[in-house]
Amino acid sequence: MNLIKSSIIMAALMGCTHVFSQEIEDKRGIVAKNAELVKVQDGFSFTEGPAVNRFGDVYFTDQPNDRIHKWNALSNEVSVFKEGAGRSNGMYFLLDGTLIACADNKNELWAIDTDGNHEVWITAFKGKKLNGPNDLWVRPKGGIYFTDPLYPRSYWDRSKESEQEGQNVYYLSADKTELFKVADDLVQPNGIVGTPDSKYLYVADIGAKKTYKYEIREDGYLINKELFCEMGSDGMTIDERGNLYLTGDGVTVFNKKGEQIAHIPVPAKWTANVVFGALDRKTLFITASEAVYTLQMKNRGVW
């Protein structure tokens, strides 16, 4: 086991960025040599939904404050991209720069253009309101998978009771003409990500404290469900070697076999989500409660 230890220092970078004391459990050397967890910015209410565009910039949400922020990968600066963001949670970029967002305010799926203008893509399933789209993954071959757990919100102006049968995973076809369930036997599906070859999909059942792996059929349906690991997750990402990054108590990393190979502690009450940013996709960008952090990695993330 390789333990990376560092002393507490105040970094001059950006004048307000902090580098933290940390002890990272890294059995396979996936973290860059001498890398340290860096707080990019704090002062948020609850950060979520990091999504990387083709330039390596990361967009993330501050859901209670109903904003989407942008982290510039070159300058390390954070700015407001969109106010009135539908209380967006999980997000993902299409290749054309469209940002797809799980807009939790009215339980919808939005498409947001580069100027911040949005279009509502999904409002319901079979005429009934969704529980609240939470996280999503865009299939490279086309189509969108998203989880729909029930987290009653204080800002909803509707009943807090579910209109759907259960908490499910859905698939929206590439042409947006079909929306159907692909998993309906989970307690509370949350984090979701797939492999770049479109062969496998990982879904975290945070309610059951488990993560499952599915095979993806050409038509979008899922088959051959198998237990991947005994841990749920809020959000997740994957690197070029197929390692899966789960969140909650910091970031926990599993290899393809479902074996834990690393744990990255984060000084926050809850680590919500994670993605690989920057042009080389070697910067792990972490959203954790009131702040966002970065950590340099050896492996690249996949997009």
Image (cartoon, grey):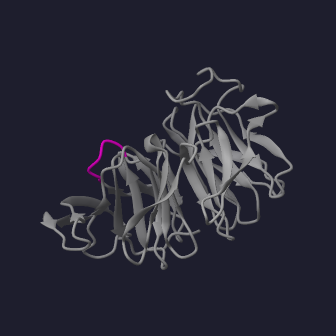
Q: Can you give x and y, in whole percent of width and height, for residue 46 in the image?
A: 40, 44
Say above or below: 188 vs 158. below
Total number of numbered discs in the rendering? 0
Tell which residue pokes out farthest to the right in this image: 177
The residue lying at 59 percent from left, 25 percent from top is: 157
Q: Is residue 267 magenta?
A: yes
Specify the segment rendered in magenta: 265-270
What is the magenta segment's predominant secondary structure?
loop
Q: Can you give x and y, in whole percent of width and height, for residue 246 in the image?
A: 46, 51
Specify the quadrant that holds the N terminus: bottom left
- Which residue occupies the foreground of this view, 11 or 198? 11
Q: Is residue 303 left or right of residue 44?
A: right
The residue lying at 38 percent from left, 69 percent from top is: 30
Q: Is residue 236 magenta?
A: no
Q: Can you give x and y, in whole percent of width and height, for residue 169 in the image?
A: 68, 41
Specify the quadrant that holds the C terminus: bottom right
Whether residue 202 is visible here, answered yes or no, is no
- Which residue occupies the foreground of this view, 39 or 141? 39
The residue lying at 70 percent from left, 60 percent from top is: 139
Quarter of the view holding residue 132: top right
Q: Can you give x and y, in whole percent of width and height, for residue 264 in the image?
A: 32, 57
Q: Is residue 97 left or right of residue 286?
A: right
